[in-house]
Amino acid sequence: MLKQDFASEPEDPIGVLGRDRFHIPHLTPLQRFVIANILDEARGSAELDKDPNLDLIVDDATMNQDEKTEFPERQETYRQLILFPTGFGKSVCFQLPSLLLSGLTIVVYPLLALMNDQKRRLDEANIPCALFRGGLSKEEWHEQEELITSGKATMVVVNPEILSAPKLRRFLNRFGIAHFVVDEAHCISEWGESFRPSYLALGEAVEAISPRILSAFTATAGPHIVQSIEKKLFMDKNYQLVDAEADRSNILYAVVHTLSMIRTLRQTLLYCKKPAIIFDRSRPGTRLKAELLKASGFNQVRFYHAGLDRPERCNIEQWFQDSDDAILVSTNAYGMGMDKKNIRTVIHSSLPESAEAYIQEAGRGGRDGKNALAILIDDLAARYSLYCRANQKDDRERDMQSIRKACFLPYPALKSCRREFLLHLLGEQQTPECGKCDNCIEGSHTSKMQLDSDASDISPEWEFLSRAEGFIETISFCASHQGVFTSKELIDILGAYGKGKGKYAGCLYGWLKIEREELINSLFMLDILYAPKKGTWKNRILLSQKGKTLSKLARNSLG
């Protein structure tokens, strides 16, 4: 059943670690954004090389060979510039992940006083830390190396000058660098161009060390400082900008329930404002959706992911940046170093990995301050599958990422304010209703239909299914033609072929064949339809008991 929430929502693992090890009762949303980015990127590329749902709807002949072959894990360093206000608890954003990452976390500080203070605080929290600076005796240097070699310390505190020592670089590279952090990154501009040239060499040090993640923290973000960080630290390569403005009141959240993702995408794009971006989980999925949309008459549409070569990516980025009516289908690779101000619609075609990921990606819209719409297309069959998998695992089997996704899973089924729910997951204790999301505007979606005892248990599913385009007509047709059609025949007669051949035949006229196939496959996945493999009704479409109950509700709704 498509539950509206979990009976016992799992406790947030990031919040638990912040409370137990760092004595922080509640992490702020900005802290959570930064920590989530680091943990997500440490798992490897968030893009999927294969979409498990494509097997149902894609002919292998439509895929290029390079898209059929699995891509290797992305090795390029993930770069992020974090605009973090002074006094907002910045240190925990790299201290907490250091306890979870596989590899060392290196933190560069500008002043010895800051280095010593950091080490003191970590020692007080019983988190071993190695510190390298100029002037260490041979014995002191060996003690710091031993902390790392023994596995006691996973965080290493340095200054820019000592990091230029080949001896230290060779030693650190033996252990693998998960996260390279530059605190007070404005010093690259303010000091590196005057009396501390070692700051200007940090970019070269990063290239030599090759960390999985590079984070630059600063509270000062004037154009000159940002340009200096881009050039000297990021070496003019793409990066992610993370700031306190990721959640904004001009983002209007909405959910559309569907049994056919392609159909809902097409219909949504007919009416929503452009430019628009569609986030998809997989590289092949971006190409498939872009080509289907283009074939449906959307001429200004292209796809984008990290697997494209750099010249092609740059070309697409410029095209999207310059257009006022473009539609870009992308993995979450879009956004690294790009800041298109006037995106009016952000669509997610699958459930994001966490609340943090969703708010940041939805926040690509409306950066000019005007209203933007963030739509999550709720694939009911996919969510049912996710729910079943989540509840098959006990708490001991769940890793941090699966727990974070499980916390977000109730979002599509909410009846209350969507923004309030999102901010609650980010640790906000008291948040008013936004008054702008679909639930706040429309009020409760609770069905006013009187349900008999047989139907009451299925009412949550009916609420979502009844709002999915094509469901009521399709199940009504199936109810009056049980055992008559095979799956292929049903898909045909629901389309143009069935027009004029009986009540509800041809009810999906105007739908693409792939969309009708998606709808029927979804009804099978939701255990509403089934086809026996043998016997009198072999391969013929029948309604399950749940399907029969839903068809009765559909008949009552039609009058």
Image (tube, rainbow, N blue to C red):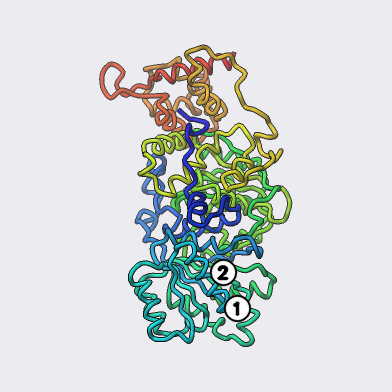
Contact between labelled residues 1 and 2, with CB atoms less than 8 Å apart: yes
Position of 94 relative to 455 (above/below): below
Name the residue carrying label 2. 216
Nearer to me, 391 or 526: 391
Name the residue carrying label 1. 188
Residue 511 in view in this figure: yes
Label 1 Cα neighbours within 10 Å, binned few <14 / some 14-19 / many ≥20: many
Dot 2 or dot 1, earlier in sequence: 1
**Quadrant in the picture for residue 234:** bottom right
Position of 206 relative to 432 (above/below): below
Q: Which residue is drawn at 52% across and 42% down?
A: 408
Q: What residue type is labelled 1?
A: Ile
Quadrant where the N terminus lies? Answer: top left
Apparent side of residue 448 relative to residue 464 in the rendered image (left or right): right
Apparent side of residue 361 relative to residue 457 in the rendered image (left or right): right
How far is disc 2 from disc 1 in space, using C-alphas?
Answer: 10 Å
Q: Residue at x 60, y 61 (%)?
A: 89
Image location (x, y in percent) of residue 355: 55, 47
Looking at the rendered structure, the secondary structure element under dot 2 is strand
Quadrant where the C terminus lies? Answer: top right
